Image (cartoon, coloured by chain):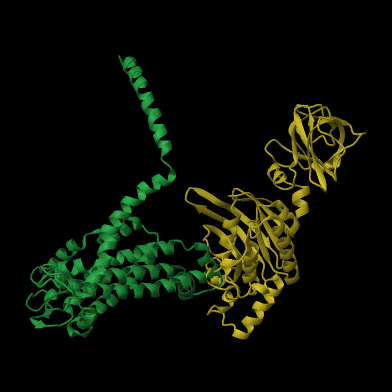
Amino acid sequence: MSNVTLQHVTKRFPGVVALQDVSFAIDDGEFFVLLGPTGAGKTTTLRIIAGLERHDGGTILFDDEPVDDYAPADRDVAFVFQQYSLYPTMSVFDNLAFPLRSPLRRVPVEQIRTRVRDTADKLRITHLLDRKTAHLSGGEMQRVSIGRAIIRDPRVFLMDEPLSNLDAKLREALRVELQHLQKTQASTTLFVTHDQIEALTMADRIAVLDEGCVVQMGTPDDIYDRPTTTFVARLVGTPRINLLDTARENGVLTVKGSSMELRALSQELPASFLLGIRPEDVTPDSEGEFAGRVALIEPLGVETILHVEIGDQTLLSLVPGMTPLRTGENVRFSIVPDRLHYFDNDGHRIQL
Amino acid sequence: MSTEAKSHVSETARPAVGGLRSSRRALSDRAIINIFIWPTLALLIAINVFPLFYSLYLSFTDYSAIANQAPVWIAFDNFARILASEQMWSVFATTGQYVLFSVVLQLLLGFGLALLAREKFFGSGIVTTLILAPMMLSPVVVGLFWKLMYNPTFGYFNYLLGFDNPALAPDWLASRIAGQPTPGLALLAVIIVDVWMWTPFVMLLILSGLKAIPDYLYEAAAIDRASSWFQFWRITLPQVAPLVLIAVLFRTIEAFNKSFDLVMGMTGGGPGDQTEVVAVNLYRQAFLGQWQTGRASALAYMVLIIIIAISNIYIRNLNKMRNQS
């Protein structure tokens, strides 16, 4: 396995700049996730690393060696596509064996057979080996296409939203399997997703991409607990973070359109800014200093989302288990003061 | 004035509308089905089914449509005579060569053109459309102007091949080179025109198959280090194979039957009987000279059996392919 470095990579398509000065480094054996909304340039980044797309500026290095001029075959990467790109006329066995049968590789037939068996065992698709791929379910197809990637020993795994076409249950199951595989093989993996849960659960490190730029890079903890912009803060975490227009005056923070007033922890805050509160930091509490009204309850089983109205503002609150509260009831709640986030009006984090 | 007219219309129209509505309701679905089906069926029986069975009957008789005599039942004599006739075997051989060469050439050229037309380049849309032009022309017209192209004195074909002395150049349709008889030349000339005319059709079918292959298959293959040769054999060909088979099926059937217009337009079967394919021979027996209607019917049935047999082989393979993928 290799480490992968992108330096100032830029890509333009007619009329749009798809990637703007993208730089990051993936360590050997690291599970690196590119997270961003649709159209952020995640897939383009992946395709450029694979060599399927040519970048207009910057350099890509594998093990500190530039690979810019290498064709996809010479880069020795494995790619898992979003649309399970299986060869439709071949059996599962032939699909798995396909990369090994390349005339450029010359793997002996016996070895091909054992490696296909091993891979099929790992992904629990041994019983499907003789089937034609057209008769497989979505989950089975994606297992096969993951199998086609892990059957060889590439320098890096590139995965383009491999789980997004699967239903929720399968997605969770395959997510765990992928993570397990990656950890046991210590493979360098670049995983693209728009699903923040996949990113947070699987990644060693995450790079958040927006409109072709890397907005933030860090561990899942960094991204969740210290989002550098309101964009990142909104992107990760469900339910979504509460962002409230707030004014500071004489050491008191007043949330606009409500009666919420907090003591300012710092004098460095500007007169007007955005206050970010994660829903799990808003807790109903009979002793709480704030009063509101329950506007809506969304029970999810393990936890419940409360929509609390306070003046013109609605705060989301996440409480464990079920709640005895009823819609329309008045409720007192408290917030965790040292877990508040502050953003200036341009959306950048104010570091205190 | 206009309001007056309007009220007048509405008053008289109302009962009529009501009447129409009730009569429409009276038409049951079954009645509507009958109205549509029976005329079609009657027409079909009159011009398709009846001639089919009548000619089957005639194929077992000695009959001429211009002789004022009733058909005489002779059982399998017509078939036996056709199979025993050396001339007929030569006609079948000519047809076989014609079908084989034109279909194989059309397939190879059509596949090549389709691979080229798949690439996007400046003006590729226009070029593809222009390539399709020949198959939109009438075969008779094509035959006539290729006759001009092949003309040894002023035709373009020889000129483009580099002959500048008409006396030494091949006279394609007369099967002569520099005055010397060269058998097969006229058949080749007709095959060239058939290929020119119908390659675009094969290209169109195969192109539609090629365009349906998703790009990511090739991308996956490129990453899997498959050579372009390997990609062609393992991805492109299996994916378009059903369409190739359909193209071959269509062209085979047409080369059997519809070669008639082209050959008649260019050589009329000549020189001698060098380009006399089955369709032309059939026409001669049926409508020239003695009008051997019975014998021509027998020949037509033999062609039908051959075509059904060939089609069956193709369709079976096609189904096999469908089941595989």
Query: x%, y% of residue B131?
Result: 29, 61
Q: Quadrant of the N terminus of chain A?
A: bottom right
Query: x%, y% of residue B265?
Result: 15, 66
Q: Is residue A24 left or right of residue A243?
A: left
Residue ID at (67%, 74%) = A126
Using the image as rendered, state which of residue A179 and residue B79 is in the foreground. B79
Residue ID at (41%, 67%) = B243
Residue ID at (70%, 74%) = A121
- Image: A103 above or below A31: below
Chain coloured yellow here:
A
Find residue A182 and report its image quarter. Answer: bottom right
Regarding residue B24, the answer to whether it shows in the image is: yes
Find residue A347 and report its image quarter. Answer: top right
Count the marks: 0
Residue ID at (61%, 67%) = A145
Regarding residue B157, the answer to whether it shows in the image is: no
Q: Is residue A228 left or right of residue B92?
A: right
- Image: A100 above or below A57: below
Chain coloured green here:
B
Using the image as rendered, state which of residue B161 and residue A269 is in the foreground. B161
Q: Quadrant of the C terminus of chain A?
A: top right
**Of all residues shown, which one is farthest toward the right?**
A287
- Image: B136 above or below A185: above
Query: x%, y% of residue B245?
Result: 39, 70
Query: x%, y% of residue A244?
Result: 75, 34
Q: Is residue A283 left or right of residue A28?
A: right
Q: Is residue A224 left or right of residue B159?
A: right
